[in-house]
Amino acid sequence: MEKPTKKGVAPPMAWRTRLSILAAGCLTDATCRADGTINRRLLNFLDPHVPPSAAPRNGVASRDVVVDPAIPLRARLFYPCPSGGGGGTGDATKPLPVVVFFHGGGFAFLSAASRAYDAACRRIARYAGAAVLSVDYRRSPEHRYPTPYDDGLAALRFLDDRLAGLIAIQPFFGGEERTPAELRLVGAPIVSVPRTDWLWRAFLPPGADRTHEAAHAASPAGAAGIDSPAFPPATVVIGGYDPLQDWQRRYCETLRGKGKAVRVLDYPDAIHAFYIFPEFAEARDLMLRIKDIVAGGGGEH
């Protein structure tokens, strides 16, 4: 009788992709200091900023805007060009829906001008035929909780419009316990328990642990406000090779427990942050799903 094959910690992938993912992990590890700070000079060298482009690139132009000059808080605005093809409507007079994008990086790394997120936002704008406002929120450990959240709220107020929907792509949650996925996927790409532990220590208020409301979204404090009528229908994206997936599923259960509409997009063979690697089939599928969600106005599930 054959023994069942043990599932690894990453799906099969091309060697170029594997090298890119390995480099991303090395970037974070190389710039984290033991004292809880980040070597920003080295990080800026390893993650050089991509300038905005008034001339369309892949059918999408971009420019940097000031959201709040008092902070100062900036964002990068991406918008599809009618002649660019792709996912746009081709009608320059038609108002565009707006996707407000908060980039990944554990609240500490990367930016709206990072190459990976500049390219990802261009793809979203092109596929969805939408403007994308990528918020360049302030990062920890220099700016701990609640500063990045405050910057996100400032960006929403800048638009001064209602939220039609929420797309949470592998959201960053955690807790003091180690979940089955965290224990099973030791050594998974991009995300690991030592990395996330370091990020939470850098982000949370001094003295707080991972039961804090900003980390533990399924806790009563973390769920505060979800039952507001203003909280929109949610789509939560989960990857089968993401160590954070159990926390993300608990978040979905919390939303449902509050009577909220929740759609789960489950990608069994996806790693954390898969959507910034366009060579993955799941990345293209997600772009098409985002296009459908935006076209439906964020709508009920």
Image: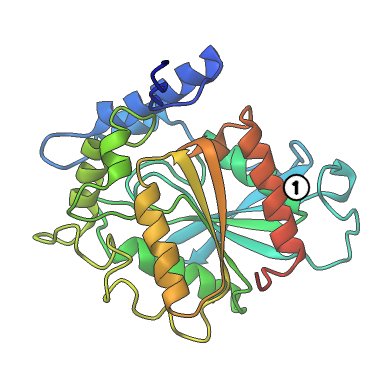
Q: Viewer-proximal residue, 99 or 242?
A: 242
Q: Is residue 273 left or right of residue 174?
A: right
Q: Is residue 28 above or below residue 172?
A: above
Residue 295: horizontal and vertical position, in percent?
Answer: 77, 63
Q: Is residue 270 above or below residue 124?
A: above
> Quarter-wise, where is residue 193 in the image?
top left
- Quick one: SS at disc 1? helix
Q: Is residue 208 above or below residue 162?
A: above
Q: Is residue 187 left or right of residue 151?
A: left
Q: Residue furthest front?
A: 1
Q: Is residue 88 left or right of residue 222?
A: right
Residue 34: horizontal and vertical position, in percent?
Answer: 12, 35
Identified at 27% across, 70% down, the residue is: 219
Residue tagged 1:
127
Q: Residue furthest top?
A: 15
Mark 1 neighbour density, 10 Å: few (under 14) some (14–19) many (20 or more): many
Q: How many marks?
A: 1
Residue 31: horizontal and vertical position, in percent?
Answer: 26, 31
Q: Viewer-proximal residue, 24 or 48?
A: 24
